Amino acid sequence: MLRFFPEKNKTFQEEQEYTFDSELPVPKHIAIIMDGNGRWAQNRRLPRVAGHKEGMETVKKITKHASYLGVKVLTLYAFSTENWRRPEEEVNFLMQLPVDFFDTFVPELMKENVRVNVMGEYDVLPAHTQDAVNRAVKQTSENTGMILNFALNYGSRAEMVSAVKNIATDISAKNIEVEQIDDDFIADYLMTGFLPKEIRDPEVLIRTSGEERISNFLLWQIAYSELLFTKELWPDYSEASLENSIAIFQHRNRRFGGLKNKEENK
C-alpha cells in the first residue's frame, strides 16, 4: 500500500494486569458503578435480592480498603432514577437495604473515621430509607477521613437540569451575573459541589460486570476521568480487585488534552 506519510508507531495495547504500587499516586476520588448483583444471584439460581445483599457486603469491604489505601472520596452508584422501573419486590428490597446496611456498618465507619454523604433526590424515598440515610450522615458528620458518597435516586441529567434551574433562578433574582458563569461556577451547583474543588471529579470511574456504559452517572464530573470496565460482577469485586483497578490507573498516561513529552509529538 502506497503511503504518502510515514506510519506512526501503534501505541494501543490491550489492558493488562499490573501490580499495585503503594509508592505511586492513589486516586483521590474513585467512582464505581456497582453492576452485576442480579446476574451474580441468577448464576447461583438465587433470587436477585440475594445478589443485592451480597453486594452490600462488598460495599463494606471496598469502603474499608479504599480508606486504608488513602482514597479521599469513594462515590458509589447505589440507586439510579431509572431503577424505579425494576419489579416492585426488588425496589422494596433496595429501599430497605440502606436501613440494614447503616444499622450494621455505621459503628465500623466510626472506627474507620469515614464520613457518609448521600446525593440525589432522596427526599422522595420511603420514610424509613430517608431516616436511615439521615441518621448515618448525622452520626458520621464529625469524621475527618474518607468520604463515602452514595448516589441514591440519582441521575446525572436530572442533576444538571436542577443546576441550570437554580442558576437561572439566581440570575432572575439578580444574585449573580451571567458573566460569572464558567466551569467552576457550574460545578458549584452540582451535587458534588460540597466537595473541595481538587477532589470533586473522580480520577477514575470503575464499572463492574463487563458492561461498558456510563448509565447517566456523573456525566459532567467524569469529563477527564479514566474509565475502567471489569468483567467481575460486583459481589465478586474484592480488595485485590480494587488494587488491580488502581494499578491500571497508575499506568495510564493522563494528558488532559495535552502532550506529556516531546516523543508524543513526533
Image (cartoon, helix red, strand yellow):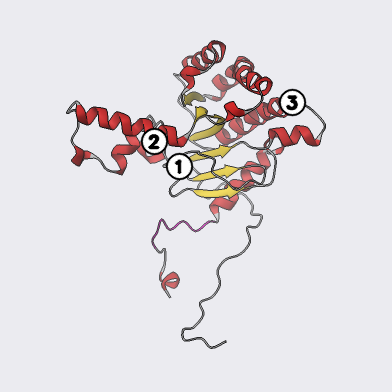
Q: Where does label 2 land, which residue?
A: 160
Quarter placement of the N terminus? bottom right
Q: Do the residues labelled 2 and 1 touch (CB within 8 Å)?
A: yes
Residue situated in front as seen by the camera: 141 or 21: 141
Q: Residue at x 50, y 38 (%)?
A: 217
| Rendered image quadrant of residue 45 | top right
Please tell me whether mark 2 sits on a helix, a strand or a loop: helix
Which one is in front, 137 or 91? 91
The span from disc 1 to disc 3 (Cα, nearest Å) is: 30 Å
- Residue visible at 55% across and 69% down in the picture: 11
Among the two numbered marks 2 and 1 on one chain, the one whose residue lies closer to the N terminus: 2
In magenta segment, residue 254: yes
> Contact, CB < 8 Å: mark 1 with mark 3?
no
Amino acid type at image mark 1: Leu
> Which residue is more in the foreground, 245 or 33?
33
User: Do the residues under discs 3 and 2 have CB atoms within 8 angstroms?
Assistant: no
Residue behind mark 3: 50
Distance between the alpha carbons at the discs numbered 3 and 2: 34 Å
Q: How many labels does the image show?
A: 3
The Cα–Cα distance between marks 2 and 1, rounded to whole angstroms, is 9 Å
Task: Look at 40% across and 64% down and name the residue there.
Answer: 259
Under mark 2, the amino acid is: Met
Q: Where is residue 80 in the image (x, y as percent from the top left)?
A: 54, 31
Which residue corresponds to the image point at 49% horizontal and 59% vertical from the top-left? 253
